[in-house]
Amino acid sequence: MGTIKALDGNAAIAYGVMRSKVQLVAAYPITPQTPIVETISSLIDTKQYDATYITVESEHSALSAVIGAASTGVRTFTASASHGLALMHEVTGVTSASRLPAVMAVVSRAIPGPMCLWCDHSDIMTQRDQGWIQLFAKSPQEALDFMMIAYRTSEDERVLIPTMVDIDGFFCSHLTEPVNVPSVEEAERFIQDFKPVNARLDTDHPYAIDNLTSPAIFTEIKRSQDLGMRAAAGVLDQRFAEFEKLFGRGYGRVMCDGTEDADTVVVCMGSMSGTVQHVVHQLRSDGKKVGIARVVAFRPFPQREIAEALKNARTVAVIDRVSGMGSFGPLYEEVLASMRISGSNANAYSFVAGLGGRDIWEQTVEDVFTKAESLSAENAVCDQPIWIDLKESEVRTHG
């Protein structure tokens, strides 16, 4: 089934866009996502893909073009990272409030300062409350697959919420692996022609979108978005199951390994998940009861699924690839809230790692397990994040 191609994460996203039969792409280049739109442009130029590509003057304009096109009933795509995603911030909320099922690829890169080209999750986490579904892929294959799943989920009339598919800059975006690319015929078993539910723009019947809204209705509009986001959880489960039946690749909003009997579980997202899983396998072969709970869907957050995954653990270590300055990382906060559902008494610890492109390698993960288990043995309270692989001699208390 399908054709095996050597693709990096960026190219895999581009092929996912093509196989999803996206009709309009509007984007502005930024490292490390530029190869996505370059590949799409090349596929269009070589007649392998029939779509409209709009070159715009900024990321703000790119998403604005997507909003306009989606409002007329067109399947749309854009991509960005870091500064570019920050520039889109003004209109990411508009996309969601307008209930437009657009899809965006985010190739995560640190937001400065200081200036940085490399990966962490400080860009996409600024968008976590803007009303977008957020899926975190760990590999090029998942990048392609999640694009197709994103369109089927966002366009469902129970949802009508846009989706961000996130891949880690360079760690996934520029990693080349064998990727199974479905044929056109195979993809069409999963991706149907776009049948817009709420397209409103029509030159013959003028209509205002995102106009000034009074306090009398604003709260109700936000609640409507929230209901669509919550409905996305069940729809994602359905799409994952349907995708697995057709293509044999199984996914879930939380993907666990070894959590059933684990004393210590690491919770994480993105490309680091492969390393964590590898270390888990190594430690389990040494007789240690450890596991991994990998969050795939950060929005809508899988609270009950995380609670179930962690219910037997004595120690939980959460690795955020972003610092919640003065507080905790966003993943840790979500996990801590979720644990209350199962009444878990596990000691939970917040870790910060992998900022600005710093590698999260085997030793990093082993240090997380060791530190968490040591603190838990003392029944220590986590009152602030633990920074892993920190070069203390380089830390300054002022600029």
Image (spheres, rainbow, N blue to C red):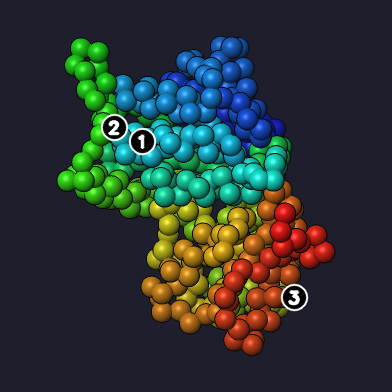
- Quarter of the figure with the N terminus: top right
Residue 271 in the image, given as x and y percentages of width and height: 64, 50
Residue corresponding to mark 1: 94
Query: Could you tell me which secondary element the residue under label 2 belongs to?
Result: loop
Residues at marks 2 and 1, CA–CA distance in whole angstroms: 7 Å
| Residue 297 in picture, x, y percent from top left | 47, 52
| Dot 3 and dot 2 residues touching (CB under 8 Å) | no
Of circles 3 and 2, the one toward us is: 2
Q: Position of residue 171 (x, y in %)?
A: 69, 44
Cβ–Cβ under 8 Å for marks 2 and 1: yes
Q: For the residue marked with disc 1, what is the amino acid?
A: Val
Q: Is residue 314 above or below residue 46?
A: below
Mark number displayed over residue 210: 2
Question: Badge 3 is on which residue?
Answer: 286
Asked if residue 313 is positioned above or below residue 44 in the image, the reply reads below
Local secondary structure at mark 3: loop
